């Protein structure tokens, strides 16, 4: 029996499962867990264990149609400035309940588009977090990078604040695929971004790819994979596209008739995983997720789970 047939026999292509964007997953969130429970959990953190801090920057100049993350489009920095003020007030509230002496082992900025922040905003936010959670020696600071929304000044500001890992959003380099998901991003722009990151001393690079996108074929995805390998990342995250237009209204702009069928999704995932493995990226450094139909998606995991993970969202 072929692998695709075994997967189908298990009912994986018909199952409805939660998108793994957080833990616990969204369906088990409940109003029964409230502010008192949160304060109790935060107060119980062990100062001897470094915390990992996640900050969500939910703003984008363009809203990519494939994305189902919590984001808001904006053409000005005014709402971003207001949001940063909210984050600083959130930090002040945390200070009232956190035990003294907590230090930070990791910090990650996601979105949205963290690189929508101007250099001055980058410095202000990073300093506010580090004042609350002083970093330990050898800490990791990673940022999600949109190559079309970053320049050398922003990269230098992030590097000055300690960024040592960059996660570069790519999805697919084929122009037809990009047009069909509302995200035009030529390879040359991404190449220039990678060069600027390395010139700023950033040595750890992750790239994000998505299989199962509209108009994506084996030949187009292989060309994208080859271009990614030319960028020489030390890690690749490979996601399966989750088509959930009832959750993310912007996905209604994506032509459903152009989405690959189940077996094609499986073949795309297998092709990309095999190509990365053959190029010398061991399996734990890329994520060859098997398809789960169009109802479920996957999310990159951090290399090692942190025992304590506060998240800051306004």
Image (cartoon, rainbow, N blue to C red):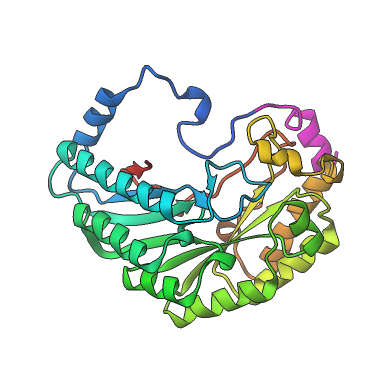
Decide: is 155 above or below 261.
below
Front-most of 121 and 6?
121
- Give the position of the N terminus as an image quadrant: top right
Q: Is residue 209 left or right of residue 120?
A: right
Furthest residue toward left? 100
Residue 64 placement (x, y as % from top left): 65, 51
Task: Please identify the quarter of the rendering in which residue 39 is found.
Answer: top left
Q: Give the quarter of the image for residue 92.
A: top left
Quarter of the image that includes the C terminus: top left
Confirm whether the magenta stretch covers residue 5: yes
Is 263 left, or right, of 141 in this rendering? right
Could one spot residue 279 in this view of the protein? no
- In the depicted structure, whether residue 227 falls above or below residue 44: below
Q: Position of residue 113 (x, y in %)?
A: 51, 55
Q: Which residue in the rendered view is the most extreme toward the top?
A: 32
Residue 210 visible in the snapshot: yes
Residue 272 lies in the magenta stretch: no
Residue 45 in the image, given as x and y percentages of width and height: 22, 39
Work out whether 221 lies above or below 229: above
User: In the orientation shown, which residue stands out farthest toward the bottom?
Assistant: 199
270 or 309, which lies in front? 309
Q: Residue at x 20, y 52 (%)?
A: 132
Segment tinted magenta in the rendering: 1-16
31 to the left or right of 271? left
When the figure is inspected, residue 211 is found, relative to residue 247, above or below; the finding is below
Count up the numbered dots.
0
Identify the residue shown where x is 37% and y is 47%: 83
Viewer-side residue, 72 vs 68: 72
Image location of residue 135, percent across then percent down: 24, 60
């Amino acid at each position: 029996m072929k692998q695709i047939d075994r997967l189908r026999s298990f009912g994986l292509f018909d199952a409805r499962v939660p998108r793994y964007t957080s833990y616990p997953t969204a369906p088990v969130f409940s109003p029964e867990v409230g502010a008192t429970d949160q304060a109790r959990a935060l107060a119980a953190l062990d100062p001897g264990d470094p915390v990992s801090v996640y900050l969500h920057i939910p703003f984008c100049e363009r809203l990519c149609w494939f994305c189902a993350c919590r984001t808001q489009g904006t053409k000005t920095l005014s709402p971003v400035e207001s949001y940063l003020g909210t984050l600083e007030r959130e930090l002040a509230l945390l200070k009232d309940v956190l035990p003294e002496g907590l230090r930070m082992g990791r910090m990650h900025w996601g979105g949205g588009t963290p690189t929508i922040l101007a250099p001055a905003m980058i410095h202000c936010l990073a300093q506010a977090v580090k004042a609350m959670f002083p970093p330990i020696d050898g800490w990791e600071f990673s940022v999600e990078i949109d190559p079309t929304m970053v320049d050398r000044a922003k990269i230098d500001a992030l590097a000055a604040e300690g960024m040592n890992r960059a996660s570069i959003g790519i999805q697919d380099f084929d122009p037809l695929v990009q047009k069909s998901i509302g995200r035009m991003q030529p390879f040359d722009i991404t190449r220039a971004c990678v060069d600027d990151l390395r010139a700023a001393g950033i040595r750890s690079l992750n790239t994000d790819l998505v299989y199962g996108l509209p108009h994506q074929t084996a030949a187009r995805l292989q060309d994208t994979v080859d271009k990614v390998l030319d960028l020489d990342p030390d890690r690749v995250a490979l996601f399966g596209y989750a088509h959930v237009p009832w959750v993310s209204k912007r996905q209604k702009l994506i032509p459903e008739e152009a989405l690959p069928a189940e077996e094609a999704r499986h073949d795309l995932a297998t092709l990309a995983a095999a190509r990365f493995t053959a190029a010398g990226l061991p399996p734990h450094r890329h994520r060859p997720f098997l398809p789960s139909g169009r109802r479920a998606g996957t999310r990159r995991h951090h290399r090692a789970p942190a025992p304590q993970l506060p998240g800051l969202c306004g």
